[in-house]
Image (cartoon, grey):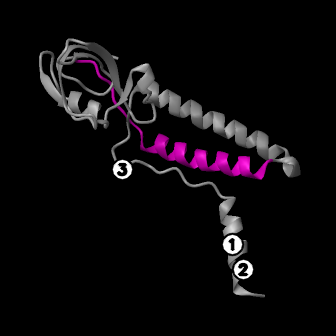
Amino acid sequence: MSRAFVNEDNAAAQADQPVERQISAQPNYVTPTGLAQLQARVAELQQLHSQQTAQGERADKQRIADIERDLRYFNRRLQSAQVVTANATDQVRIGHWVTFADEHGQAQRVQLVGEDQADAAGGLINWGSPLGRALLGAKVGDEVTWQRPAGHLIIEVIEINAG
């Protein structure tokens, strides 16, 4: 058998395997809500895995491989989770809701959360994002620089609330 056919077989087998989800190098800080969401996601994936494998020969092998990949990822995220509770509001911490205004007085309210909980459209900002890093540690009245690809923006922290 030609060596080319062996390599094609290996390539076909590898193509069926889903690409592993990369784990971030930053610490996995999570809010209590973020931890609950991770736990719920792992439980959901475990249930889906059980349902798929119970189907035996009728099971969708690609779907099972995708579920197993996601289970590996979320189990690692759950194991590395460091729960952060933000009670004091003297400076911005993970879990806080922060209201800030830009140079034009446009106000925005966001919550700093862990990366798995982040949802920019919902106002949940990853603490390690450019906006999260700009706000982290700031106090009411502080002006900080939000380093954006569209250009730097000076923002002022107006209010800090516990999550």
Residue 50 is situated, as x and y percent measured from the top left of the image, at: 75, 42
| Magenta span dominant secondary structure | helix
> Which residue is most to the left?
142
Magenta stretch holds residue 86: yes
Image quadrant occupied by the C terminus? top left
144, above or below 7, in the image: above
Specify whether residue 29 is in view.
Answer: yes
> Tags 2 and 3 in contact by the CB under 8 Å rule?
no
Element class at badge 1: helix
Q: How many marks?
A: 3
Q: Is residue 115 left or right of residue 15?
A: left
> Which residue is most to the bottom?
1
Element class at badge 3: loop
In this figure, which residue is indicated by the disc labeled 1?
10
Q: Give the range drawn in magenta.
A: 60-88
Magenta stretch holds residue 153: no
Query: How would you rate the neighbour count of disc 2 (Cα within 10 Å): few for under 14, some for 14-19, many for 20 or more?
Result: few
Mark 2 vs mark 3, CA separation in Å: 37 Å
Q: Which amino acid does label 3 sit on?
A: Ala
Q: Which of marks 3 and 1 is in front?
A: 1
Query: How would you rate the neighbour count of disc 3 (Cα within 10 Å): few for under 14, some for 14-19, many for 20 or more?
Result: few
> Measuring 66% from the left and 45% from the top, which residue is drawn there?
67
Q: Tell me where residue 132 sits by quadrant.
A: top left
Element class at badge 2: helix
24, above or below 87, in the image: below
In this figure, which residue is indicated by the disc labeled 3?
25
Query: How would you rate the neighbour count of disc 1 (Cα within 10 Å): few for under 14, some for 14-19, many for 20 or more?
Result: few
